[in-house]
Image (cartoon, helix red, strand yellow):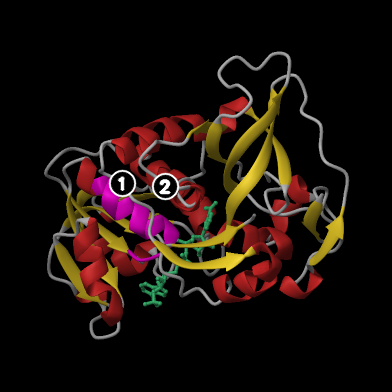
Amino acid sequence: MKALVYTKYGSPDVLQFKEIAKPNPKANDVLVKVCACTVNRTDNATIKAIPFFARVVTGLLKPKKQTPGTEFSGIIEAVGEKVSKFNNGDRVFGFDDQGAEAHAEYLVISEDNITSIPKNITYTQAAASSEGAHYAYNFINKVPLEKGQKVLVNGATGAIGSAAVQLLNYFGVIVTAVCGTSNIELVKALGANKVIDYKKQDFTKDNELYDFVFDTVGKSSFFKCKHLLKPGGVYISSDLGFVSQNLFLPLITPLIKPLFANKKTVTPFPVNINKTLTLVKQLIEDGKFKAVIDREYPFEQIVEAYRYVEKGHKKGNVVITLD
Ligand SMILES: NC(=O)c1ccc[n+]([C@@H]2O[C@H](COP(=O)([O-])OP(=O)(O)OC[C@H]3O[C@@H](n4cnc5c(N)ncnc54)[C@H](OP(=O)(O)O)[C@@H]3O)[C@@H](O)[C@H]2O)c1
């Protein structure tokens, strides 16, 4: 089969197409013929081994999995003997942030990392429905969210941000979305109640108070945002921060609560992909979630897609289509 392969960490220049053997599913795995996949920020960070300590999982000196790709949709062509929820011919989509080797014509993946594609969406739409949603849902699951609370989402037009606005809207929260001028109508359509144009206004100077601030593009810090939080409010960022402070601040802020009026920060380590897939599938069927798609590239141009995604200005998701 045709696959994108890299044997050393680096820029998209390290990626090349190769003919490799089709994988075989183990007992709990399915073999999927990939119809569409995405190039996302997880893939971009993985090929560059960023942050450095990610090498503990991806391989210390060189990548253990030589085909990148985490998010996909496709058709099941074979199932392992212990697979109970899926059959050959099922249309599925899924995600594995540990690496699904999705940038290839076929992949194998655990049945826990997939769900069936709702009838009302295409393979293209399905392929873009899990990565951003999974990280967004993990932000939400880290806080005691209640209907009517106020949340500020910075970077509301990224894969994570555009999913977060929709999920928060579903949970009945009042959302202030921060985005660039050209995307104001998009974020209103996703369900934002108020929009701040980051190209014209510094959102940290906003005069409202929020229960939670979600910086889904990691462009701010707890210290720059803490005055926006109500007492007891929580700041979460998708990024580790300038000096990786978002790794240790979650340990420190709860210890010195009175100093910050009980405000704290939490690290949204992503867990339980199956829980996200179950929710997202239901919301898609109910017409309450639709992945935002910026561009589509044919598989042959996937390296160009990597170069576009690494610029950090995609609108939602970038999808790769296969025959
Ligand atoms: N924790 C994890 O495991 C994990 C996983 C994946 C990603 N991440 C991190 O999460 C972040 C977001 O990921 P993503 O996939 O959602 O990103 P993305 O899709 O690449 O985000 C791009 C969007 O961010 C907007 N943006 C850029 N600079 C901005 C700013 N200063 N203020 C407001 N919006 C801005 C852009 O709008 P304009 O074009 O208008 O600027 C664009 O629409 C990345 O830093 C990534 O490294 C973390």
Please tell me which residue lies in front, 20 or 11: 20
Residue type, label 1: Phe
- The magenta region covers 156-168
Q: Is residue 80 above or below residue 60?
A: above
For the stretch drawn in magenta, what is the main secondary structure? helix
Q: Is residue 267 visible?
A: no
Q: CA distance from mark 1 to mark 2?
A: 9 Å
Q: Tell me: 290 left or right of 302.
A: left
Which quadrant holds residue 23?
A: top right
Residue 51 shown in magenta:
no
Q: Residues within 10 Å of mark 2 (few under 14, many from 20)?
A: many
Q: Secondary structure at mark 1?
A: loop
Residues at circles 1 and 2 in contact by the CB criterion of under 8 Å: yes
Please tell me which residue lies in front, 42 or 227: 42
Ligand 1 shows up in which quadrant of the image?
Answer: bottom left
Residue 67 in the image: state x and y as whole percent.
Answer: 77, 53
Q: Tell me: 257 left or right of 308.
A: left
Tag 1 residue = 289
Q: Residue visible at 52% across and 36% down?
A: 271
Residue 182 in the image: state x and y as whole percent.
Answer: 29, 80
Tag 2 residue = 133
